[in-house]
Each structure stands twice: as structure tokens, then as C-alpha cells.
Amino acid sequence: MAVWIWLLLLLPLFLAGVSYGLRRSAWTRWLPVIAAVLLLVGGITLVWLVGLSGPVATASGLLRVDALSAWMLVVVGAVAVVALWGGMDRSVSPVPPSSNPVQPSSRRRPGSLSATDGAALRPTTDPILASGSFAALLCLFLAAMTLAVVADNIGLMWVAIELTTITTAFLVASQGGRDSLEAAWKYVVLGAVGVAIAFLGITLLSAASLTSGEATVSWVLLLQHADALDPTLAKAAGALAVLGFATKAGLAPMHSWLPDAHSQAPAPVSGLMSGVLLSVAFYVILRIQAITDAAVGPELMRGLLLVAGLLSLAVTAGLVLTQRDYKRLLAYSSIEHMGLLALGAAAGGPLAIAAVLLHMLGHGLVKSAMFVVAGRILDYVGSHRVADVRNLLRLRPDLAGPFLLGSAALLGFPPFVTFFTEVGILVAGFQSGLLWPMLIACALLLIVFAGIARHVLSMTVGVPAGHPQTVPVTRRAPDTSAISPPQRISLPIALALTATTVLGFAWPLLGPLTAAVAALGGAQ
């Protein structure tokens, strides 16, 4: 069984080497998709194997997969398949310069799409996505995420998280330009500060374990001997480690890198960062919370996570109402959902933790699909601005339909799984006595709902004022027969949205979720 762990770690590294060695070959862009499919298949296999015979360990215990690790491998694999398959399968080219709907022109009213826009679109391959170096970085990113999930040694996990900072920094900057480079540097600086703080917390946690007889940074040993840890050092270690990894998870007030990085990165990278990177960082927080709660009680972690969760919701609520960039809008939505996860972890208990783990999967699938769709809208319109996208449902229903459905899932509409997980988190919070924090969270969620819904509706069904249909490029009347022909809805996007509809009713997931919760030591 341990061969699966090595396969999931080494094959992405091998594919990264192939991608870089054959970087002039366009077909190498599909190698990260192969690595993602392998992760998904391997994760599902390990969920089954762990359920049958218990945790799988190798490399003298440095690498270990329990029910929680196996669940996270499924999350990483599923989200990566959607982000990479959908992102690499670019079927729409940028609008030709002669008909770009956001070109400066005295004849073009801002905030509009033309009836003729997109009529001449043709299949194309983005040169960045076709780059072998880009594919190699994606494979390295997947390998680092896998290592972070399967590492039992906290120091090794920290190294894996640091590797993700390096790879994603190059991926964010891959499009070039001042904004992309600025976003990458901001991410590197703040991410480095976060992992440095986390490293200090890990060091103190190792020192706290000396009172148990031997210094260790093993998840298993720390949890088993949590009652023997030095309580003062354990408190400081837990607080610092959570603060550091909260930076990588995009929780406020350490979130400021996230909107810039997610909005400037290519679509598949944005999907991976939002759906995978944030979730894996939060997975580490759950592990540290379990150890700290067992050592000093749940009050410390509950207070920290409540503050981070409510601040994240408040930041999102304050900024989505006036947001002008639809990719940044999705990025702020990620901060909102990380805040929800923090509230769930603060509430604790089997219901809340199970909802948190299922929410990671549902949110990751939806957000990766949404960033892919946003990338295609950018290809079609040529602008990140919300005001430059209007009447999309009429002009490009193949883009507007998934964008509307994905937005509904992000906002927690039934029957999407995010509805059930958000309700589960809020109910668990009320049951645990967090009445006022959960009421405040509900109020902030309503504000976020109003802000995101307003922007999404204006993009998909809104028509510029004074223009009953669409605004023409020239002074002549628009030729409505020139609307771009219907195009296929991307299969990975359709699968992701279908999965988020089904997951809430997938009772077979109850067993793996229950086992994953138990792996946290009872979910304090």
C-alpha cells in the first residue's frame, strides 16, 4: 500500500522533469493534467485502503496517510483536475484588436459588449499555458501539495509549504507585466513572513515535547503525548503556528496578498491557489489545533479562529460591494470561505469538522471552475473590469450559464453542497454556544451575498443604460445576427458543477468523513 504514497510523490516530479526537458513541445501542457488525475485516483484508492486496514506509513514514519490525509489527497486531486483540465483546454482566443469590446474609442460606450464581439473567435492555445516550463512548475506544485498532506513530520510539511510559495510565485508572475510581478513579490514577501512565523511555532512545539521525554515533530506522537507537553510553550507554539499558516490560508488580517495574486495569475493557477493551496494550509491549521486543544484545552484556538473567521467575513463584506474586478471578486470570495472554515474549526465537534472537510472539497471544485470561466470571459472581453461585461447571458450563454451556477454555489444556494456545509457550520456554532459570533457571521454573509449577486447579475443579464439590446461598435444599428454562435460548455466545468450538486446527497461520503474527523483526535 505504501507504494501509492511514493507513486503520488515521484510521478509529478518525473513529469516535471519531462515537461522542462521537452519544454518546446506544446503537448507537455497536458502532463500536469495527468499528474492531477493520478492524484485523484490515488487519493480515492488510499481512502479505500485506509478504511480497510488503517493508516499507511513509509520512510520510517516520515510519510503517513491516515483518513484525513487521504481525504485531502482527494480534495487536491479533484480540484487540480478541474483547474488544469479546464484551464488548459482553452477554446476561445482573445478578441481581435479590431473588435475588442474594451478598446478606447469615442464610439464605444464603456461597460458594454458588442453584438459582433466574438463572432470571429477561433480555437487557440495560450503560449503561456503551452510552455513546458509552466507545466513543470505546475507538476512541482502538485508534488509539494502532496508532500504537505502526507508528511507526518511537521518540519517536512513546513518545507513542502515553503516549496509551494516558490513555485506559485513563478506561476503568478508567468504572464509578465508590472501588475503580475508586483503581485508575485507581494505574495513572496508576505508568504515568507508567514512561514517564518510558522517555523518559530514549530520549533517551540518541538521544545514543548521535551517534557514528554523526547523532542519530536511527528503529528502522531505529539497528539498521543499532548497531555505531557509543556503548556506554556504549547500555547505559544500553537498561536504562532496558526498565525503563520493562516497567512498561507488567506485568513484576515494576513490576507492582503491573496486578491492580487489570484487576480493576476493565469486561470488554472488561480483555481489551484484558491481551491488547493488555501485548503492545504487550513488542513495544517486543523492538525495544529488538534494538538493544542489536547494539550491546553480548546479556548486558545477557538478564540484565535473566531477572530480570524469574523475578520475574514468582515473584510469580504466591506470590499465586494464596491469591487470593480471580477477576478478579484472571486478572490475575496475565497477569503469569505476560508473565514467560514475558521468558524467551523472554532465551533469544533464532529458536525462542524465534517462540514469543514466537505466544504473544502465543494468550495475547491466550484472556485476552480469559476476561475476557469473567468479566464475565458477575460479572453472574450479583454478586460478584468466588471463594468466591461454586460449581457453575457445573451451573447455567450456557454460562459454565462456556468458563471451563474457557480456563483449560486459560492453563495450557498441549495441544492449545492456548499448550502449544506454552511448550514452545518452555523448549526454547530449555535450548538457550541457561539450565539453572537454566528449571528454576526450570518449578517456579514448577507452583505457578501448582496455584493456578489449584484456584480454577477450585472455581468450576465445587465444591459448598459440607454441601450435596450447591446451597444454597437459603430454608429450603425447592431447586427444581432452576428452574435457569436453557441459553443460547447467545457466538460471539466460541467463535471465540477454537477459534483457540487450531488455531493450534498452522497451518503457514501459519511464513512470517509467520519474517519477523517476521528483522525483529528476526536475533533475537540
Image: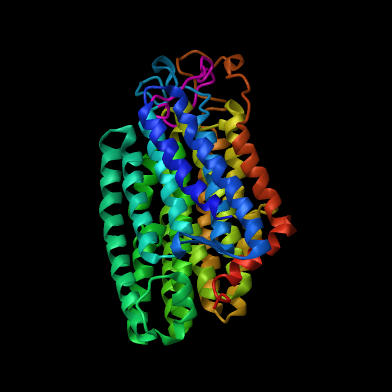
Measured along the vertical axis of the image, is residue 140 above or below residue 231?
A: above
* Dominant secondary structure, magenta: loop
Query: Relative to residue 44, is residue 302 drawn left or right?
Result: left
Figure quadrant of residue 485: top right
**Which residue occupies 74% across, 59% down?**
507
Q: Is residue 123 visible?
A: yes
Give coordinates of residue 441: x percent, y percent. 52, 68
Q: Is residue 110 magenta?
A: yes
**Which residue occupies 58% across, 54% down?**
361
Give coordinates of residue 54: x percent, y percent. 62, 65
Give coordinates of residue 96: x percent, y percent. 42, 17
Which region of the structure is painted magenta?
A: 109-130
Residue found at the far front of this picture: 60
Figure quadrant of residue 55: bottom right
**Which residue occupies 66% across, 56% down?**
48
Q: Nearer the viewer, residue 292 or 409?
A: 292
Measured along the vertical axis of the image, is residue 196 above or below residue 269?
A: below
Q: Quadrant of the C terminus?
A: bottom right
Q: Nearer the viewer, residue 46 or 382?
A: 46
Give coordinates of residue 268: x percent, y percent. 46, 38
